[in-house]
Amino acid sequence: TIYVVPLEPSTRTCPGGAPAVWRSENGGDSWKRRTAGFPKKDSFFTVLRDAMTIDETKSPALYLGTTTGQLWIGRDGGEQWECLYDSLPPINCVKSAVV
């Protein structure tokens, strides 16, 4: 499974201010846009290349961090997204670990 967060090339923000995660389950031959839980418009954040990770524990989830200090969790393979924190410093990297 491949996940991508597309960004506008000139501004490096979400196209049209509507964030989405694109998911492919066949090596990139086809893609599905996942937006449930994300703002529908006027959300111009950036996700850097190391700011998305997969937690493959008992309850797998995806996490992405934004340069505007938001930490998002995607459940059910990224079908549904929820903002966990929205006032952190800019997030450059996200990693998951079992402690």
Image (cartoon, grey):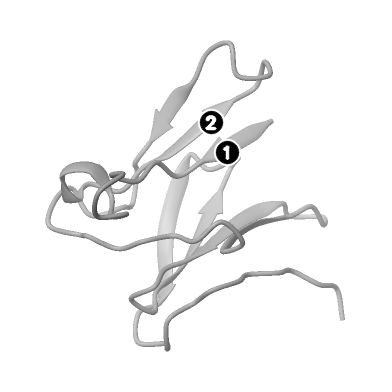
The numbered mark, 2 or 1, whose residue comes first in the sequence reads 1
In percent of the image, x 87 and y 81: which residue is there?
99
Q: Which residue type carries mark 1?
A: Tyr
Q: Is residue 29 above or below residue 31?
A: above
What residue is rendered at 39% in x and 29% in y?
A: 33
Give how far apart the Cα atoms at labels 2 and 1 are.
Answer: 5 Å
Q: Name the residue under label 2.
A: 23
- Tally the marks: 2
Q: Which of these two is toward me, 94 or 11?
A: 11
In x, y percent, where is residue 93? Answer: 60, 71
Q: Residue 27: which disc?
A: none
The residue positioned farthest toward the top in the image shown: 29
Mark identifier at residue 3: 1
Considering every residue shown, the one lying at the far right of the view is 99
Q: In this view, does 7 lie above or below 52?
A: above
Q: Are marks 2 and 1 in contact (CB under 8 Å)?
A: yes
